[in-house]
Amino acid sequence: MTYYGFHILGFIATLIYLYFVFPKYEVNRLRGFGLAACTYLTAYALMLVLFWMITGDFGGQNVIRVFLFLPLILWLYANTFGVDYKKSLDFAAPVLCIAQAFGKIGCTISGCCESWWQLSWGVYNPYTETRLFPVQIAEGITAFLIAIAVILIAARKDFRSGGRTMAWMWVMFGPTRVIWEFFRANEKLFWGLSELSLWSIALTVAGVIWLNLDKRQGDEKA
């Protein structure tokens, strides 16, 4: 219950963030929350389906697999709720980071998403019954810092980033997740990289391409 409790807290935290940020983007709160709810439910369902397709099991909370599909999911619902698509990309960018920052606390307490690195000063893990490097806490702090960073990026542009905030989130989240994956006890495929590392690399590459294409389009208009 502790695990899901912190995930619920993360969801509440994202709702609070959206409540205050919608006016900044000139988005009607009712329409914005409708878009957010549908996007969240679709992303959560997709996360479970992808986990089942890859592992054959059901119930994994590996949110990194969903990040690349967020623009498509938002596009599906933006017109339905009358929300500007590019604005939805911007205000949605920090959402999963905020949710993960809280969720990783639950992971730490319950013992999932654990590290392989045993340390005398580490956090006790109930699964392995040993003290391990608190990689979950490290991931949670990183996700929270990225959320703050992308919010500041959007604020610097007066909350008119033209959708680029999502790309910046990808560029920051991808590499840091690759780093923390080296410390996690996930099965490594090659060069110390796990399957989730490959998703993270793909996210990083996609973010870099997105920002470069956007910059070229801006240069051409100039």
Image (cartoon, rainbow, N blue to C red):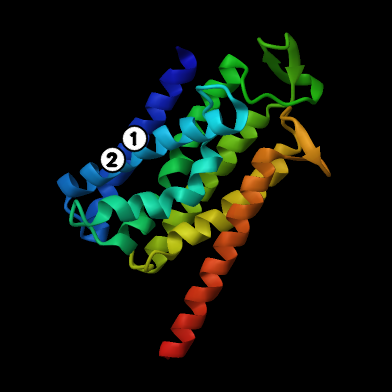
Question: Where 67 falls versus 52 (above or below)?
Answer: below
Task: Indicate the quadrant where residue 130 lies.
Answer: top right
Residue 154, x across and y down, in percent: 40, 62
Query: Which residue does the numbered mark 2 point to in the structure image?
Result: 38
Answer with left or right where residue 112 lies relative to residue 194. left
**Residue 28 — which label?**
none
- Mark 2 lies on a secondary structure that is helix
Q: Quadrant of residue 139?
A: top right
Residue drawn at the location 59% of the way across and 25% of the way down: 56
Which residue sits furthest right? Answer: 191
Taking the spot 28% from the left edge, 40% from the top edge, the residue there is 38
Query: Label 2 crowding class (10 Å Cα cut-off): few <14, some 14-19, many 20+?
Result: some
Q: Are marks 1 and 2 in contact (CB under 8 Å)?
A: yes
- Distance, label 1 to label 2, CA atoms, is 5 Å
Whether 123 is drawn above or below 81: the answer is above
* Quarter where residue 156 is shown: bottom left
Q: Is residue 79 above or below residue 199?
A: below
Residue 97 screen position, x and y as percent: 48, 42
Taking depth in this image into account, of 93 and 101 the one nearest to the observer is 93
Q: Of the residues shown, which amino acid type is indicated by label 2?
A: Cys
- Position of the C terminus by quadrant: bottom left
Q: Is 58 on the left-hand or right-hand side of 12?
A: right
Q: Amino acid at mark 1?
A: Leu
> Quick one: SS at disc 1?
helix
How crowded is the residue under tag 1: few (<14 C-alpha within 10 Å), some, or many (20+)? few
Where is residue 167? Give x, y as percent: 50, 60
- Residue 23 spot, x, y in % from top left: 22, 55
The residue drawn where x is 53% and y is 26% is 60
Residue 41, label in figure: 1
Residue nearest the observer in this picture, 49 or 80: 49
State the quadrant of the N terminus.
top left
